[in-house]
Image (spheres, rainbow, N blue to C red):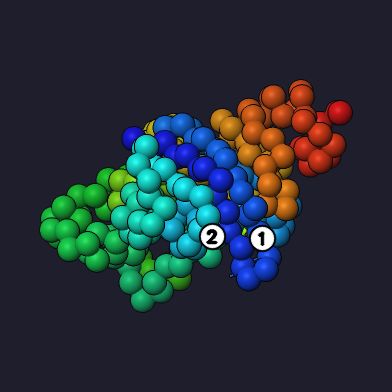
Amino acid sequence: MGSIKLEQLSKSFGEHAVIPGIDLEINDGEFVVFVGPSGCGKSTLLRLIAGLEDATGGRILIDGKDQTQTPPSQRGLAMVFQSYALYPHMSVRSNIGFPLKMAKIDPAEISRKVEEAARILNLTDYLERRPGQLSGGQRQRVAIGRAIVRNPRCFLFDEPLSNLDAALRVAMRLEITELHQKLKATSIYVTHDQVEAMTMADKIVVLNKGRIEQVGSPLELYRSPANLFVAGFIGSPK
Ligand code: ADP
Ligand code: MG
């Protein structure tokens, strides 16, 4: 569960073809990083997959089924946002459980799932606190907890660490990698940071002006960059 296939997926805003047409296959359980300079269309591509933007053309298949027209809440994906989007007046417990409450899940089941997510994320001691009483890294973990409780087929991360300072970024990078090793759920991680891409990815997708320049493992991209753009961006010796 959790394979994603894009077929000639495109998006224009008015006359501006931000994504002219992308073909890509993501396998179940893979940690895939979309990397590229600011404005190249990474967020737009992720939002298309999430269903937060309507495609102009092409198809999105999730586990082999066409989901191009499916509303976001029914795609079985969970997005982790850069600005944590937590409710300041609610406890950590309520923030993590919020999607389940909206889905009218039984309160005992919500408690069970929230506590399980808190255990995975080392947030057990913080469940009754409010977001304002947490550090940046803890807030980011709460946002991830809110994604975990939905048991998604795939996690979608849009530059989740860009608001954190350098030391915390390194720590959270390791935590997200560890989380992926625990849950083994397909993950798509968007960043403009080459180091994050090279250290976290099973597979890197290098984007430039809405097009894929190269897809490969960190080592493949480093050893055999397809062109000067990839070589320059990844910092490999072509
Ligand atoms: P990235 O995430 O790689 O920085 P984005 O996907 O946010 O890039 O943006 C890619 C391009 O699409 C940019 O030129 C941006 O201005 C444009 N764009 C994104 N969203 C919209 C929108 N809602 N309306 C018009 N243009 C947009
Ligand atoms: Mg972006």
| Residue type at the position of mark 2 | Thr
Rendering coords of residue 55 (x, y %): 51, 58
Element type at mark 1:
strand
Q: Are marks 2 and 1 in contact (CB under 8 Å)?
A: yes
Rendering coords of residue 58 (x, y %): 51, 50
Residue for point 67% across, 42% down: 212
Rendering coords of residue 210 (x, y %): 67, 52
Judge left or right: residue 58 versus residue 148.
Answer: right
Check the picture and name the quadrant holding the N terminus: top left
Ligand 2 found in image quarter: bottom right
Disc ID at residue 17: 1
Residue for point 69% across, 24% down: 220
| Residue type at the position of mark 1 | Ala
Badge 2 is on which residue?
Answer: 56
For the residues marked 2 and 1, what is the alpha-carbon distance in whole angstroms?
A: 9 Å
Tally of numbered discs: 2
